[in-house]
């Protein structure tokens, strides 16, 4: 009787272990394939050099959104809510931002960061999709579209960076030097405050995000912006493209001045983060553009 009971318990334990192993495999499969429920899901994706965090929800044609330097997926909250009524909308934290890990080798060039977009698109199985980028993220979005023009249906550049290689050295050298000095915090927060507009609540939020962004990410990211020449990617991507800019972003080397015949829309009365300050107006422009 004792031997029979022992055998029964052994078999029972084996079944339990097997069931737990099966549940573990199923959980890993759900995580790896990106199975979604009815609402937004934040998940970790294997990027080119580090784990990336992605917010993915909605059904229909896909739109992928890329934030600015010192940004995160939350900068697109107003757009994600709007787009997910009729589309699948995806936002990612770029390397070293938000909840994404920093790159192991410290690579922050615009072209390298565009590989984060590709890694997310591949993981989620997005074959063709629209890309929306803000500021530095617009450069990242453009770099991806230029390298993979067959995968991008629409490209919207929100108050984008320009041709950093054309920016006069005398204008940027003191600023870049200050980033490597004890005056880093005062310099970077002063600059952020100068371009953020007049909405105090928005500025407070942006400064919190800025302070949460590692200094290395900021310094390397700003150097990457100054080293980026958007003209080759603008020439390679011939699909529907739109620049949505503020009046202050208007220089000979601004991105919308570099692309021949690049359509643009201007949103007034806002700072650099126009999609946060003017979400309704921005969303109307975005919606019309995506319907083209």
Image (cartoon, rainbow, N blue to C red):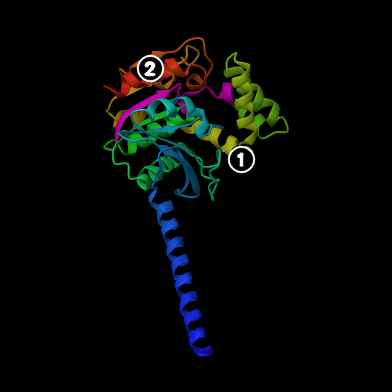
What residue do we see at 45% from left, 42% from top? 112
Q: Viewer-proximal residue, 237 or 226?
A: 237
Q: Is residue 221 above or below residue 51?
A: above
What residue do we see at 37% from left, 21% from top? 286
What residue do we see at 54% from left, 32% from top? 71
x then y, percent, for residue 44: 48, 47
Where is residue 271, by image quadrant? top right
Check disc 1 and report its element: helix, strand or loop. helix
Of tags 1 and 2, the one toward the viewer is: 2
x then y, percent, for residue 239: 27, 28
Disc on the earlier residue, 1 or 2: 1
Q: Viewer-proximal residue, 194 or 65?
A: 65
Where is residue 139, by image quadrant? top left
Check disc 2 and report its element: helix, strand or loop. helix
Q: Viewer-proximal residue, 220 or 134?
A: 134
Q: Are marks 1 and 2 in contact (CB under 8 Å)?
A: no
x then y, percent, for residue 256: 39, 19
Q: What residue does disc 1 label?
A: 216
x then y, percent, for residue 119: 40, 46
- Point out the stretch of residues depicted in magenta: 152-172
Q: Is residue 173 left or right of residue 25?
A: right
Residue at the far right: name it.
182
Q: Viewer-proximal residue, 156 or 178?
A: 156
Q: What residue does disc 2 label?
A: 284
Q: Which mark is residue 236?
A: none
Q: Badge 2: few (under 14), some or many (20 or more) residues near its Cα, within 10 Å? A: few
What residue do we see at 61% from left, 40% from top? 216
Asked if one can make out residue 104 in the rendered structure from this viewpoint, the answer is yes
141 within the magenta span = no
């Amino acid at each position: 009787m004792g031997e029979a009971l022992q055998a029964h318990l052994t078999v029972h334990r084996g079944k339990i272990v097997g069931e737990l192993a099966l549940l573990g495999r199923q959980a890993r499969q759900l995580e790896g394939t990106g199975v979604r429920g009815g609402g937004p899901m934040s998940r970790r994706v294997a990027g080119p050099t580090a784990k990336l965090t992605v917010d993915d929800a909605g059904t229909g044609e896909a739109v992928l959104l890329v934030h600015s330097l010192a940004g995160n997926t939350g900068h697109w909250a107003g757009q994600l809510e709007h787009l997910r009524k009729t589309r699948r909308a995806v936002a990612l934290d770029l390397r070293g931002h938000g909840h994404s890990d920093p790159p192991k080798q410290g690579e922050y060039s615009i072209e390298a960061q565009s590989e984060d977009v590709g890694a997310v698109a591949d993981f989620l199985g997005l074959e063709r999709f629209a890309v929306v980028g803000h500021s530095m993220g617009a450069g990242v979005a453009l770099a991806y579209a230029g390298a993979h023009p067959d995968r991008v249906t629409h490209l919207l550049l929100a108050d984008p960076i320009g041709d950093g290689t054309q920016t006069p050295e005398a204008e940027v050298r003191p600023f870049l030097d200050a980033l490597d000095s004890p005056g880093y915090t005062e310099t970077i927060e002063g600059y952020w405050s100068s371009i953020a507009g007049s909405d105090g609540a928005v500025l407070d939020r942006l400064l919190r995000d800025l302070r949460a962004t590692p200094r290395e990410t900021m310094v390397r990211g700003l150097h990457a912006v100054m080293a980026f020449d958007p003209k080759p990617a603008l020439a390679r991507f011939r699909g529907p493209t739109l620049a949505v800019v503020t009046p202050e972003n208007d220089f000979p080397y601004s991105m919308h001045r570099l692309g021949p015949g690049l359509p643009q829309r201007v949103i007034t009365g806002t700072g650099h983060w126009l999609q946060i300050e003017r979400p309704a107006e921005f969303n109307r422009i975005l919606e019309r553009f995506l319907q083209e």
